[in-house]
């Protein structure tokens, strides 16, 4: 339960950085987490759901509901990221298959709509996965944008290079049709947290060593080992980017990022650029801005927030 009453739903495809985002959201004690919804993405829906339950048990929050959602993208085949997250999605850090916490009844898109109607104008969605569940919720309830306070999504890259193709970030590549539905839905406050800012928020072994809870420290060290190795291979830096945790960070401390409104769209039919998020910086298309794009981040302040929350 939060101290501030910021009502949120976290939507995840629990791989390594989604798990860190869940830890941050729970340990911050500043968010009223109504539920965590899961979706196919980094790993299968079942694996993402099991991983989410494991992480909530690890952090001592088994009472938070977990609701499974879409088992695949809207129109495409699933594209898993085992090279980055390991076969189990958590870098092999929680190998014990026994988990007493089970997912709750229900379907994630319906849960999102129900909670939005229950708390009109109060609910923030933090999406750290392909946007399939939110797209399905919009199909079910087209007025959803008028009911939500904010949507914060980790996805896309607007100035830099991709992390799954030369131009596309994983979440938008995995289900670009869903991303497009979300971008065009007419949300009053839709915040994009892309690779442009998340690549600046790096977690290294020295920072992990600052974690005071031995259980959490060991888990973070083990789970990020494969992640750090992969990041070093691709980028020459021995660290890993806190992609998904930064989306939670924006909900906790909006001043961490500098945002500006632009018209943003996603490529869904390109031989080379499928899944690329395109930001119209110079308004060449003459469209109304639809997205608050995070352009700057205070990376040092965010890392401090992350470590302090996990040490709380």
Image (cartoon, rainbow, N blue to C red):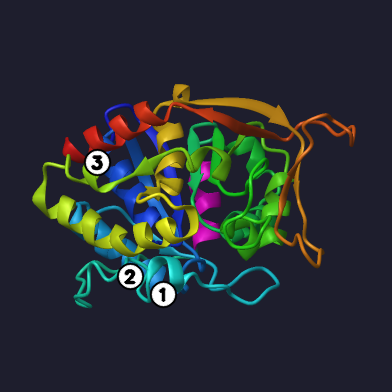
Residue at 55% x, 35% y is 150
The region drawn magenta spans 108-118
- Could you tell me what secondary structure mostly forms the magenta stretch? helix
Front-most of residues 168 and 72: 168
Q: What residue would you read off at disc 2?
A: 50
Element marked by disc 3: helix
CB contact under 8 Å: marks 2 and 1: yes
Front-most of residues 13 and 187: 13
- Is residue 230 a member of the stretch shown in magenta? no
Please tell me whether mark 1 or mark 3 is closer to you in this view: 3
Q: Is residue 54 visible?
A: yes
Q: At which x and y percent is residue 248?
A: 41, 40
Mark 3: few, some, or many residues within 10 Å (few <14, many ≥20)? some
Q: Is residue 129 above or below residue 148?
A: below
Q: Is residue 62 visible?
A: no
Q: At which x and y percent is residue 158?
A: 67, 42
Q: What residue would you read off at disc 1?
A: 46
Front-most of residues 283 and 292: 283
Q: Is residue 63 left or right of residue 36?
A: left
Q: At which x and y percent is residue 270?
A: 81, 63
Q: Which mark is residue 207?
A: 3
Q: Is residue 229 above or below residue 190?
A: below
What is the C-alpha distance between the residues marked 2 and 1? 6 Å
What is the C-alpha distance between the residues marked 1 and 3? 31 Å
User: Which circle's residue, 1 or 3, is located before the other in the chain?
Assistant: 1
């Amino acid at each position: 339960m939060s101290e501030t009453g910021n009502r949120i739903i976290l939507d995840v495809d629990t791989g390594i950085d989604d798990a860190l985002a869940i830890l941050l959201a729970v340990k911050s004690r500043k968010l009223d987490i109504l539920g965590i919804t899961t979706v196919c993405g980094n790993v299968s829906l079942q694996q993402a759901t099991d991983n989410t339950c494991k992480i909530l048990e690890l952090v001592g929050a088994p009472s938070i509901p977990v609701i499974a959602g879409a088992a695949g993208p809207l129109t495409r085949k699933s594209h898993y990221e085992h090279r980055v997250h390991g076969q189990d999605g958590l870098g092999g850090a929680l190998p014990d298959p026994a988990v007493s916490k089970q997912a709750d009844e229900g379907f994630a898109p319906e849960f999102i709509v129900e909670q939005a109607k229950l708390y009109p104008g109060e609910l923030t969605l933090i999406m750290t996965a392909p946007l399939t569940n939110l797209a399905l919720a919009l199909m079910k309830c087209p007025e959803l944008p008028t009911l939500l306070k904010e949507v914060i999504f980790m996805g896309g890259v607007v100035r830099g290079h991709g992390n799954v193709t030369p131009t596309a970030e994983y979440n938008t590549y995995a289900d670009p049709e869903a991303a497009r539905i979300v971008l065009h839905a007419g949300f009053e406050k839709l915040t994009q947290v892309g690779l442009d800012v998340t690549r600046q928020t790096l977690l290294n072994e020295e920072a992990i060593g600052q974690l005071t809870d031995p259980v959490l420290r060991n888990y973070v060290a083990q789970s990020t080992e494969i992640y750090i190795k992969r990041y070093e291979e691709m980028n020459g830096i021995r660290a890993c980017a806190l992609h998904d945790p930064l989306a939670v960070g924006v909900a906790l401390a909006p001043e961490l990022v500098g945002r500006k409104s632009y018209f943003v769209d996603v490529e869904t039919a390109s031989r080379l650029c499928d899944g690329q998020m395109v930001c119209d910086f110079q308004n060449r298309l003459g469209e109304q801005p639809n997205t608050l794009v995070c352009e700057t981040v205070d990376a040092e302040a965010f890392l401090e927030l992350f470590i302090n929350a996990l040490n709380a």
